[in-house]
Image (tube, rainbow, N blue to C red):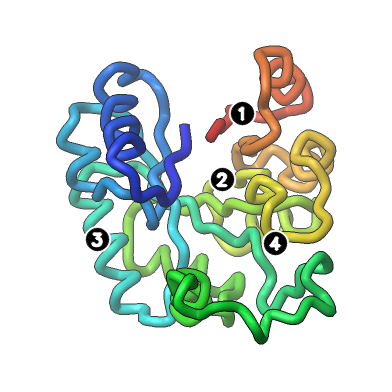
């Protein structure tokens, strides 16, 4: 179960109630959730991963990772779903100059200004140097990236396209899964995230080599 950024009381209640009522589920908590890692950990025992976005301020990243580690989280899911400087085809040629800035929360510009666009495979090694938690790489869609992730020291791979919301075109996770599994060559577990709508989707993913399934 993945939890991402929300700012409603209902979503915060759901983040915490999942931990309390279904303690056998794995939970991946985003860097941008309403509930803190400490609040989620206080609900009781459970296996939890911390989904990490790498900020330009690396000291802040270190603080986030250390907090997750102290809270008992078991792994880091390093998010690499988005390329730097991407251009969404649907917005090409659209005149945004007349938008009422008063109606803009500023969230998009804040995120764009905070996230480190220089992220590279070397950062897997860097994360390993600041934590004892295993590093899973989230956002792999090709065999080539699977091989590089393993070579870079990743302890696991999560096949994910970020819900297909951040790119103008992206393959479905189930279509990419078999290739990624072959690229990993059995050296690390490969998980599937996204596109799971029913139980049969889970069976398909397991049949194609997934070690487990994440749902949002």
As helix, strand or loop, the secondary structure at mark 4 comes to helix
Residue at (33, 25) in percent of width and height: 18
Q: Is residue 18 visible?
A: yes
Q: Are marks 4 and 1 in contact (CB under 8 Å)?
A: no
Residue 112 lies, with reference to residue 167, above or below; the image says below
What residue sits right under mark 4 in the picture? 148
As helix, strand or loop, the secondary structure at mark 3 comes to helix
Residue at (27, 46) in percent of width and height: 35
What residue sits right under mark 3 in the picture? 66
Query: Which of these two is toward me, 75 or 112?
Result: 112
Check disc 1: other Cα within 10 Å, few if <14, some if 14-19, many if 20+. some
Return the mark for residue 156.
2
Q: Are marks 1 and 2 in contact (CB under 8 Å)?
A: yes
Q: Is residue 134 visible?
A: no
Marks 3 and 4, the one that precedes in the sequence: 3
Q: Position of residue 195 (x, y in %)?
A: 70, 33
Mark 4–mark 2 Cα distance, whole angstroms, equals: 12 Å
Marks 2 and 3, the one that precedes in the sequence: 3
Mark 1–mark 2 Cα distance, whole angstroms, equals: 10 Å
Residue at (47, 31) in percent of width and height: 1
Quarter occupied by residue 62: bottom left
């Amino acid at each position: 179960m993945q939890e991402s950024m929300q700012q409603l009381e209902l979503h915060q209640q759901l983040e915490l109630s999942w931990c309390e009522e279904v303690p056998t589920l794995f939970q991946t908590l985003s860097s941008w959730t309403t509930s803190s890692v400490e609040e989620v950990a206080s609900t009781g025992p459970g296996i939890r991963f911390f989904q990490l976005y790498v900020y330009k301020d690396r000291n802040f990243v270190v603080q986030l990772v250390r907090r997750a580690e102290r809270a008992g989280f078991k792994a880091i899911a390093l998010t690499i779903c988005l390329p730097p400087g991407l251009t969404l085809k649907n917005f090409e040629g659209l005149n945004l100059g007349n938008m009422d800035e008063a109606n803009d929360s500023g969230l998009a510009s804040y995120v764009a200004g905070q996230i480190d666009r220089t992220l590279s495979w070397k950062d897997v090694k860097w994360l390993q140097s600041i934590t004892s938690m295993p590093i899973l790489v989230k956002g792999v869609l090709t065999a080539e990236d699977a091989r590089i992730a393993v070579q870079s020291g990743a302890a696991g791979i999560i096949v994910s396209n970020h819900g297909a919301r951040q790119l103008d075109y992206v393959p479905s996770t189930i279509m990419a899964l078999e290739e990624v599994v072959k690229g990993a060559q059995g050296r690390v577990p490969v998980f599937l995230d996204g596109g799971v709508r029913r139980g049969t989707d889970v069976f398909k993913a397991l049949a194609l080599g997934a070690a487990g399934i994440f749902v949002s």
